[in-house]
Amino acid sequence: MTASPVRYSDAVEKPIDNEEQVHRDLIDTMRSITETTSQDYGHAVRSVHAKAHGILSGELEIDGALPPELAQGLFAGAGRYRVLMRFSTNPGDLLDDSVSAPRGLALKILDVEGERLPDSAGETTQNLILVNAPAFAAPDAKAFLGSLKQLAATTDKAEWAKKLLSATLRGVENAIEAVGGKSAMISTMGGTPITHPLGDSYYSQVPFRYGDHIAKFALVPVSPNLTQLTGDRVNTTDRPDALREVIRETIIEQGGTWELRVQLNTDLEKMPVEDASVEWDEERSPYRTVGRITVEPQMSLGTDLAGVVDEQTFFSPWHGLAAHRPLGSVNRSRRQAYEMSAEFRAKFNGCPMHDTAAFPTA
């Protein structure tokens, strides 16, 4: 028998000690990354997930026959929405793809109606930030700040050294996996296997309000041309933009299909809201499909759309519906930090940042 989902209330969140100071320190650290890279490039890029590997336009179709616990917020009824997808890698500098790191997939769902979160009043999007691992590498904002300071310390350092470290850590990670283990810290530091981005599944890692309930999100490839790429290692030797190349090769000819899924919280002790490093047990509460994203064949970079998404817009989980409010320490720390990054880019580049824009077709 499947356990009933936990009811959402404000009481599920419990701020950590000195949370406001942690947030200020995190903003300062992200700003230091952006200041360094903007001086290097003569152009401001994102503080994290700076390098895009592909930017796609697709359509999200939401099932109109979802059970009540899934028919919440954006998913309360049938609908079709244009969606933008940005594949990226974690660091705030533009690195050779042989330097492995966790990869991200940012979603922006357009023309969404409903009560908004305060930071996005008057807007009409739902943003989701996803990463290719089911749990966050740090439990809370304080630990996240520590990891980000490590990332900041390597920004602007010799790329050859990053390549060497990355290759060494991948060897260590492969050895751990060979005996049935996995190290989140090694993966975060550069031991992540360089697999095909279109074959990976992507997770919110952190929880969100899901209408009356609490949930995490996942985006999972389901079309055969994508599932056959799952686990496929990408050769990055003398290919600094290998991930861009492999995405382009698939999308330009075949497009792809993904399922958007949610995992409802059924036990606040075993599926904590404040500890983002805990992977919620899928046997206790499996991911369930609430929508389907279809991308038709198209160019994945070098388009007017890619230019607008990379240069004129930003992604933040705090830009969306009140029904999908970000929850937990890590999500709270992102709120002002992501706004700072967008404002810095706008000022440095002389180009206003928008959550929404006149998005051209791909």
Image (cartoon, rainbow, N blue to C red):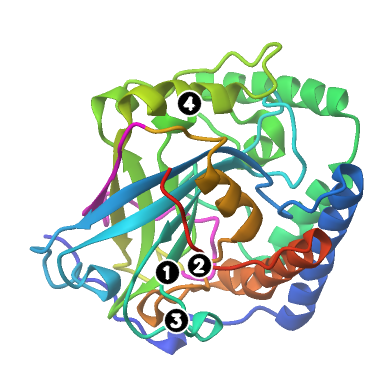
At 35% from the left edge and 52% from the top edge, which residue is drawn? 281
Please give the residue where the numbered disc 3 appears in the rendered image: 12
Give whichever of discs 3 and 4 has the lower sequence position.
3
Magenta span covers which residues? 273-297
> Where is mark 4, residue-wise?
248
Q: Name the residue carrying label 2.
A: 356
Which quadrant holds residue 270? Answer: bottom left
Q: CA distance from mark 4 to mark 1?
A: 26 Å
User: According to the image, label 1 marks what residue?
Assistant: 125
Counting other residues with Cα less than 10 Å from the Cα at mark 3, is it few (<14), some (14-19), or many (20 or more)? some
Q: Is residue 275 magenta?
A: yes
Which element carries disc 1, helix, strand or loop?
loop
Labels 2 & 1 near each other (Cβ < 8 A): yes
Estimate the spatial distance between the alpha carbons at disc 3 and disc 4, rounded to whole Å. 42 Å
Give the image location of residue 193, x and y in percent: 57, 25
Q: Is residue 316 left or right of residue 164?
A: left
Instruction: Give how far across and how far down residue 53 sits, in percent.
Output: 57, 35
The amino acid on which the numbered mark 3 sits, given as a three-letter code, is Val
